[in-house]
């Protein structure tokens, strides 16, 4: 079983427009609502890939109820921690056949000490039977930056951590198998611009030296980089018709976990993750990927070792 855990899910509204103009009335051509946020996207992608998985997340209010209903309708198994504060609502604005996407993000509300402990206890129960875990998302106000570190120390199980900033750095002592920020998140974590490949690789290697066995960094439509203490790998995304890029990084994490759990080596697991991300890119709703398409496309991802 693969466990996807995180404290900041979202109820997502997706609005598609012919165009968007600031300071004007914009009428949507289409509107959709869906469960989203990093932790839910990972769980949904694992479910779509027909893997045994369980999602652990905090939900509250009407948005939380909607998330519960959608997971139940999809048959996606989850352990919910009910919170006093409502789950955040985020909005994606898509312009027909045009990029970039505009994302309106509501920050997550705080969770109580009791709710945080309930999450910790539920995760502890599930990780006892897990062969892989994916921890993802920012931490709500008041949650200690060592929270992911504490989760990783419950049981030594291969872990993918998709986080940034102090919570990422604090978790390195627990030696996660993979940390997976995007390039912007890595820049925020290390506190500097990474304007060229050398600066990027140097910052990734610094995380390796502090405990991460592998560092995988995405950069939108550009190359994916992976480093260990001994290797530097570059992966080239496959081209697909882009519809909605939201959730691509989360889907890569899910595919990476799926590949590693199936016994693939790291390069081949990353190829599978990139195939999941590519299929997500061509969907309107995040993480609603097609397993057959993903498996076929994984072989199309090319990669190389760098000196």
Image (cartoon, grey):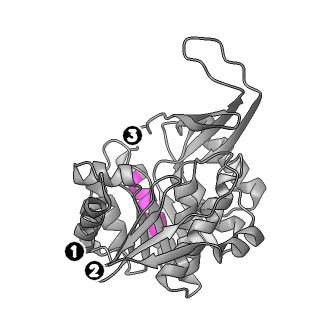
**Placement of the C terminus among the 4 image quadrants:** bottom left
Q: CA distance from mark 2 to mark 1?
A: 7 Å
Q: Which residue is mark 3?
A: 110
* Other residues around mark 3 within 10 Å, as few (<14) / some (14–19) / many (≥20): some
Where residue 209 is drawn, which disc sits there?
1
Q: Is disc 2 in contact with disc 1, using a CB cutoff of under 8 Å?
A: yes
Q: Nearer the viewer, residue 295 or 253?
A: 295
Q: Residue at x 66, y 36 (%)?
A: 14
Left or right: where 80 falls relative to 211: right
Q: Is residue 86 above or below residue 281?
A: above
In x, y percent, where is residue 54? 60, 67
- Position in image of residue 33 (x %, y %): 70, 38
73, 307: nearer the viewer: 307
Is residue 301 within the magenta segment?
no
Q: Which residues are magenta?
A: 116-123
Q: Main secondary structure of the magenta part?
A: helix
The secondary element bearing badge 2 is classed as loop
Q: Earlier in the sequence, mark 2 or mark 1?
A: 1
Question: Which residue is at a point 29% across and 83% down the rendered structure image?
Answer: 230
Q: Give the percent coordinates (x, y) of residue 104.
A: 52, 32
Location of residue 298 by image quarter: bottom right
Picture disc at residue 229: 2
């Amino acid at each position: 079983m693969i466990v996807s855990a995180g404290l900041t899910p979202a109820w997502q509204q997706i609005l598609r427009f012919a165009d968007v103009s600031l300071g004007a009335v914009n009428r949507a051509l289409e509107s959709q609502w869906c469960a989203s946020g990093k932790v839910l996207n990972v769980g949904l992608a694992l479910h779509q890939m027909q893997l045994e998985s369980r999602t652990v997340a905090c939900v509250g209010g009407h948005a939380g109820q909607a998330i519960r209903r959608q997971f139940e309708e999809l048959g996606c198994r989850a352990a919910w921690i009910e919170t006093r504060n409502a789950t955040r609502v985020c909005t994606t604005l898509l312009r027909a056949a045009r990029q970039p996407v505009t994302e309106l993000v509501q920050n997550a509300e705080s969770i109580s000490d009791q709710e945080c402990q309930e999450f910790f206890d539920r995760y502890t129960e599930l990780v006892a039977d897990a062969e892989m875990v994916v921890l993802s998302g920012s931490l709500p106000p008041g949650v200690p930056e060592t929270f992911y570190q504490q989760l990783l120390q419950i049981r030594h199980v291969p872990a993918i951590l998709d986080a940034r900033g102090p919570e990422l750095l604090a978790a390195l002592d627990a030696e996660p198998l993979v940390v997976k920020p995007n390039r912007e998140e890595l820049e925020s974590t290390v506190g500097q611009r990474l304007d060229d490949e050398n600066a990027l690789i140097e910052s990734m290697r610094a995380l390796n030296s502090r405990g991460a066995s592998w560092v995988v960094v995405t950069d939108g439509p550009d190359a994916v980089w992976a480093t260990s203490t001994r290797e530097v790998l570059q992966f080239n995304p496959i081209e697909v018709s882009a519809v909605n890029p939201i959730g691509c990084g989360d889907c890569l994490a899910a595919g990476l976990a799926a590949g590693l759990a199936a016994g693939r080596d790291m390069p081949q697991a990353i190829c599978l993750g990139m195939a999941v991300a590519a299929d997500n890119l061509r969907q309107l709703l995040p993480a609603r990927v097609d397993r057959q398409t993903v498996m076929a496309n994984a072989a199309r991802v090319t990669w190389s070792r760098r000196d």
